[in-house]
Image (cartoon, helix red, strand yellow):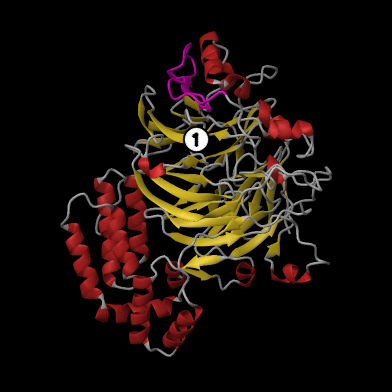
Amino acid sequence: MPGAAAPRYSPPDLPAVAKNQLDVLSVEIAQNNLADAAKRIDSLLKDSPDGLIASDDAAASSTGGMISLQTWIEQLPEAQRTALTREYRVQFEDAASRSVRQLAERKSVEPAQFLAIARRYPFAPAATDAIVAAARRSAELGDTTGAANLFSLARARGWKDKSTDAPTSQPTNSYSGPLPFQVPWFANLLSDGSPTSNASAATLQEERLMPVTNGGVVYMSTSRGAMAVKEESVAPLWQVTPGDDAPPNSPRPVSRGASFAPALLCDDQGAARIVVVRQMGATGEYELRAMRASDGKRLWSTDHSPDLRGLTIASNPALAGRYVYALGVDIGEQAGRLVMLAFDVTNGRVLWRSEIGSVARRGSGRFTRSRDPVLDASDPWQNLSSPAVDADSVYIAPNCGAVVAVDRFAGHLRWIRPYVTTTVNPITEPAAVQRRAANVRVRELPSTGIPRASVFRWNTTPVRVGDDMLVVAPQDSDRVFAFSSRSGKQLWHTDSLAQATLFGAAGKLVFLSDRSIIALDIEKLDAAWTWDGGAVGPATLSATNASPQILVPTAGGLVTLSASDGAVVSTSTGVPDLAGIAKSETIRTAMQETGALDLLVNEDKPANQPNTPPPTPKKRNR
C-alpha cells in the first residue's frame, strides 16, 4: 500500500450542467439579452433542477469542488438578479403565482412543496410568496424555528412583514447545552502520545459520552441505554436499559470510538420536551430513538423504517424545530454511500433523504507506514458528531476529505468542497501552494512529535460565524478550514491548531480547545486571546446570560470566561455537578447498568465546583 492515503470521497451521481450552457447564459446576461437568459435559466431548472457545476474557484475546481445550479444562480450579482426579476415577472409570474395558489388550497402540504416553487422560479416575485407560504405552513405544524428561518429568508428578498415578532424568552441562570465536566477520556486523548501508539489507539477506540443539560437535568446516553438525573435527587428521573432491541454482544470492527450526544427539542420557553439519541440496535447497526424528556417514554425509533433499509446512522443527531438531521450510510463492500437524512421529530417519519456522495472503504492489508486511525480506517465516516444547522442549510464534514452543504428544508445539495488531508510540500508541490488559500499562523506548532494530531479532536460539528463563513476542524486533517457558507469557496486555513477542537462562535470570534482555549478573530486572522488554565474536559459556549461565556472544567473546578476577552468572570451558571450527582449509590448503579459510569466519572478527582481562579488570559495584537 502506498505511503500516503489516496482521496476517498466521490461526489453523488447527479446530472452535470454543461459548461457551454453557462457560458452562453453569462454572455446573454452581460449583453442585457434578458429575455433569452430568463428562458435559458428556466429550461436549465426544469431539465436539471439538481444539476452540479464545477466550482469556478480555482482551488476548488482542481480538487473536485462542485456547486449546484441553484447555488450558482444565487451567486449572480445583485444588479443582474434585479434585471432578471423584471424579466421573470413578464414571462413566468403568472405560472408561479398560480402554482402557489393551487398548492395553498390543498390539505396536508409540506413546507418543502412551497419551496420547490421558489426553486423552480427563483426570480419571480411569487417565489417570495412561496417562501412566506412555507413559513406559515411551518408555523401551523408547530415548527416556530423553521417558520422564523423562512420568514427571515423572505425578508432578505424584500418581503415586508406587517406583523410583529413574538417576544423572545428572557435568558435565565439555568444553563442549557452540552455539559462541561471533568471526564477520563479527555485526559487520555490529550496525553501527548502518538495516535499510532498502542496506548493511544486503545484510547481512540473508547466511547465518548457527551451529556447535555437543560433546566438542571442531565441527559446522557450510551450504546446500551439512556437516563436523566438531577442534582439533589437520590435516584434517576428515568432510565432506559436494553430490552429486545439490545445491541449484540459480538465485537465490533476496530474503529474510532463512538460518541453519544443526546439532542434536545425545547419548547418556546426553553424547557426540554423530547430527547433524541443515537444507539445501537439488535442488528448491530446504529439507529435513532426519541424519548419523552419528562419520563423517558419511547416515542419512536428508526429501526423498522422502510425508508432506511440498509442504512446505519453514522452521526449524532441535530435538532432544529421540527427537523432531526443525521448522516446515514449504506455500507457496501467497496464503498460507503453517504445519505443525509431529515426526520419529523414528532413521529420519526423521513421528511427527505439526499445522496451526498460515497467514500471508498480501506482494506485491512499491511501498510508501509504507521496506520492512521482515521485516514486508514475502514469506515472514517462512522461515529461522527452532529451536523451543523444554520438558517436554511445543513453542513457536515464526514471525515472523508470534503465538506457538504444541503438545503435543510428539502435536502437539495448546495455545494461540495474537498480539502487536503495532508500538508502540502512547498518544494515538491509549488503549484498547490500557489493556489491554496491563506495559511493563518495562530500560535507556534506543538513540538510533540505527533505525526497527525487531529485524530484527538472530540467534536467535528462545523460552526457558522459572521455573515458568510463556515469553520471546520475535521479529524482527517490537521488543519482548521474556513469556507464561504453560501458557495463553499475556501477562505483560509491554519496549521497551528492541529490538536484543538472547534466548539463554538460568538460575533467575529471562533473558539477552539485542547488543554487551552483559543479565540480566533476571523477578521484579523489572529488569536484574539488565549487561556492556558488546563482544561480537563470539553469546554462549552453558553449564551444563557446577556454576554456569551465559555465554561471550562479544570482540576480545580468549573471556570467561567468572558467570550469577548477571555477574562474570568463570576456568574451563576446553574451547571449541574455530575460528579456530585454520581455520589448517590442508586444513581451510580443506574449509570453502571447503562454503561455510563466508567466513561463519565473520574473517581480520583474532586467534584466540579465553580470558579477556582485560573491564569489570566493572554492577548495577542498585531
> Under tag 1, what secondary structure?
strand
Above or below, 444 relative to 267? below
The residue lying at 56 percent from left, 32 percent from top is: 210
Q: Name the residue under label 1.
A: 286
Residue 88 in the figure: left or right of residue 185: left
The residue lying at 46 percent from left, 56 percent from top is: 406
Res 68 seen here: yes
Please state, as top left, top right, bottom left or bottom right, where the C terminus lies in the image: bottom right
Q: Residue furthest left?
A: 105
The percent coordinates of residue 81 (x first, y second) are 39, 76
Amino acid residing under circle 1: Tyr
Residue 322 in the figure: left or right of residue 208: left
Residue 455 in the figure: left or right of residue 146: right
Name the one closer to the observer, 180 or 359: 359
Q: Does the magenta stretch include residue 144?
A: no
Q: What stretch is highlighted in magenta?
A: 221-249
The percent coordinates of residue 307 (x first, y second) are 37, 44
Q: How many marks?
A: 1
Name the one closer to the observer, 222 or 163: 222
Name the one closer to the observer, 292 or 545: 292
Q: Mark 1, residues whose alpha carbon is within 10 Å: few (<14), some, or many (≥20)?
A: many
The percent coordinates of residue 132 (x first, y second) are 28, 59
Residue 263 in the figure: left or right of residue 92: right
| Corner quadrant of residue 91 | bottom left
The percent coordinates of residue 171 (x first, y second) are 43, 37
Q: Is residue 237 magenta?
A: yes
Res 535 seen here: no
| Corner quadrant of residue 192 | top right
What is the magenta segment's predominant secondary structure?
loop
The residue lying at 70 percent from left, 31 percent from top is: 203
